[in-house]
Amino acid sequence: MDPDKKQRIMQAAERLFRMRRVHEITLDEIAREADVGKGTLYLYFTDKDDLIFQAAVAGFDRMCLTVRENAAPGVAFRQTLLRTCETISGFFQQRRPLFRIILSEGDRDMEGGGVGLRQRWRERRRPMTEAVAAILSQGMASGDVRKDVPAEVLAEYLLGILRTRSWELQDRPEAERSLAGVADIFMNGAGPGARATPAAGKPALA
C-alpha cells in the first residue's frame, strides 16, 4: 500500500466532486484524474462511496486531537472555545463538497445494501463530540460553563450551532455568522441580557 498514491486518488476525486454531481462521476474517471489504473482504486477503497467517505474524514483524528490540544495551560476558557470553533469549522470548510455529498445524498445505501454514508458519519463523528465535551468539562471545572447539563449534551448543542452556521446560514453576511458570534451566543444565549455579537474581524470574548 502506498499512502501517497491513496492521497492522490482522494485529491483527484475531490477535484471532480467540486465540479460535478456525484452520480455524474465514475471510478474510471477518478482513476484517469489520479493517473492510476482503475484496479488500483480497489486496493484502497471498496467502491465510490467508500472513496468519498475516506476522503471526507482524512485528517479527522488529527483535527480531534487539535481540539483537545486547544486547552493550553494559562489560556482563558472563552479563547479556548473560540479556537475550538475555528478548528472544527476550518476542517469542514476544506471538505465541504465531500460532506455535502454525505449529508445530502447519504441516506441512500451503499452498493450491496450496506450502511449508508450518513450513518457511517454518525458513527465516525463520536471522537469529535468527545473532544468538544472534554473542552467543555474544563470550562465546568473553571466555572465558565454550567454544570447541570452533561458536557456531551452541551457539545452536541455547540456542534449543532456550528453546523447551522456552515450550511443554513452560508449566504448570510460574515458579520452575522462569525465564529466569535457563535461562541458568544453559545456562552451567553440570545436573551435580552446577552452581550452584542462582536463584529467580524474585531477582538471577541475578552
Image: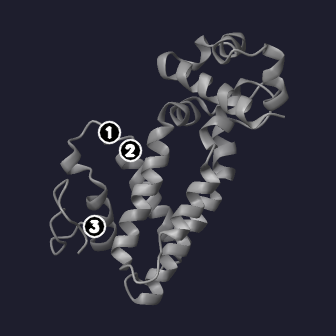
According to the picture, the residue beneath numbered tag 2 turns out to be 166
Q: Is residue 131 left or right of residue 89?
A: right
The crowd level at tag 1 (other Cα within 10 Å; few <14, some 14-19, many 20+) is few
Do we see residue 109 in this rendering?
Answer: no
Cα separation between marks 1 and 2? 5 Å
Which is more N-terminal, label 3 or label 1?
1
Please report contact status of discs 1 and 2: CB closer than 8 Å, yes or no: yes
Q: Is residue 175 left or right of residue 131?
A: left
Q: Amino acid at mark 2?
A: Ser
Q: Amino acid at mark 1?
A: Gln
Q: Which residue is found at the position 43% from the left and 50% from the top?
A: 89
Image spot of residue 59 (x, y percent)? 61, 48
According to the picture, the residue beneath numbered tag 1 turns out to be 170
In the image, residue 19 sits, relative to residue 151, either above or below, namely: above
Q: Is residue 63 left or right of residue 172?
A: right
Q: Is residue 82 left or right of residue 87?
A: left
Label 3, secondary structure: give it: helix
Please report contact status of discs 2 and 3: CB closer than 8 Å, yes or no: no
Do we see residue 36 in this rendering?
Answer: yes
According to the picture, the residue beneath numbered tag 3 turns out to be 184
Where residue 56 is drawn, which disc sits there? none
Label 2, secondary structure: give it: helix
In the image, residue 122 sits, relative to residue 152, either above or below, namely: above
Q: From the image, which quarter does the N terminus lie in?
A: top right
Cα separation between marks 2 and 3? 16 Å
Q: Which residue is found at the position 67% from the left and 51% from the top?
A: 124
Image spot of residue 167 (x, y percent)? 39, 40
Which is more N-terminal, label 3 or label 2?
2
Cα separation between marks 1 and 3? 19 Å
